[in-house]
Amino acid sequence: MSAPGPARRLAIWLGGLVVFCLALYVLRAVLLPFVAGMAVAYMFDPIVDRIERAGVSRTLATVIVTAAFFLVVIVVAAALLPLIESELVALVKSVPHFVDIVRDETMRLVQRVAFSMSPDDVQRVRAAMGDFAGKAVAWLGSVLGGLWSGGLALVNLLSLVFITPVVTFYLLRDWERIVHAVDGWLPRDHAATIRELMREIDTTLAGFARGQALVCLFLGTFYSVGLLIVGLQFGLVVGIGAGLLSFVPFIGTLGGFVAALALAFFQFSDWRWIAATAAVFVAGHLIEANLLSPKLIGDRVGLHPVWVIFALLAGAALLGFVGILLAVPVAASVGVLARFTLKQYLAGPLYDRKNGTPSDPR
């Protein structure tokens, strides 16, 4: 039986990719602990390799790294969760007070404006405000419905807690074996090219993911400590949330800045403390932009912030939290493949070399 031609082989690979994407979408509800375990294993595989090179068996090295990581997670969670819970409870209890303040200030503003408006204009404003209130109530109902459906997903949460460490252990222990097996499946004619692309994807992904994780850890600590020093209520929750959201470029700092300033306006009557709250985020952003990101991430990873933001939003829309975990690896892979395709195009016959010189796609 003759081997399939290039066109048929390409069709087979594309068909396999389509089937894989469909399976990913259909099984998205149960993939979270497996994707999370894969992410942890990928992050710590270099450490296991170093321990193994020191003469320790792969299994023992995997036990050491896995146990150490989850022990640190448990200790940090045990230390921070009570504080975060108390601040969240206090924040929820303070919401009616914040709403009363906003309502009173809004009514004063409406009364001032109403004196300069005709009765018809006042009626139209009231109708518009009523329509807005109805939409706000509908939105709040949808949010509460989402929280309720998330509350019903207790099984998924328990699977994340208990299955993720198991998945992490086995992936870390068998990482080299898995890589070797996948390498054996590659089409022999293109194996060298695929390996080179995978190495570039690994470099891009590792540079961004590991570097951005360190940036998030620093910013979460910096914002939390800074806001606590300023004396902002709920500063710990805002600081940790801003640090976690910093995995999405600009979003964490901007969201934390807006939330902290809003709380500062409610809490402080002296503008200097409001300015000090803003200064915490300005200082954190300057340190991140001028020191941390250039050193830990750099410009060579090839992941533009806009591309990362789009990938994270698209992943969240398609697959939920699983999509968020898969977004950066997919974005890194697509970026590398796009640069490779552009390089092939510039070096091929489709590019008109007579009208220009091919430039470096990077």
Image (cartoon, grey):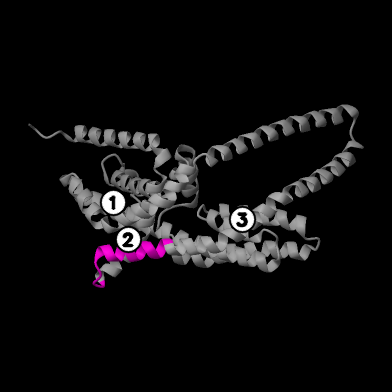
Determine the CA span between mark 2 and mark 3. 33 Å
Q: Is residue 27 above or below residue 276?
A: above
Pointer 2 or 3: first along the chain: 2
Kindly identify the amino acid type of the residue bearing the numbered disc 1.
Leu
Pointer 1 or 3: first along the chain: 3
Give the residue drawn at x 22%, y 48%: 182
Report the residue marked by disc 3.
85
Give the residue drawn at x 58%, y 40%: 147
Residue extending furthest toward the left: 1
Q: Is residue 325 visible?
A: no
Closest to the camera, between mark 1 and mark 3, is: 3
Report the residue marked by disc 1.
197
Kindly identify the amino acid type of the residue bearing the numbered disc 2.
Asp
Q: Residues within 10 Å of mark 3 (few under 14, many from 20)?
A: few
Determine the CA span between mark 2 and mark 1. 20 Å
Closest to the camera, between mark 2 and mark 1, is: 2
Range of magenta residues? 54-70
Kindly identify the amino acid type of the residue bearing the numbered disc 3.
Glu
The N terminus lies in which quarter of the figure? Answer: top left
Q: Is residue 144 visible?
A: yes
Q: Nearer the viewer, residue 36 or 324?
A: 36
Tell me which corner region of the image, top left, top right, bottom left or bottom right, holds residue 281: bottom right
Q: Nearer the viewer, residue 186 or 170?
A: 170
Report the residue marked by disc 2.
45
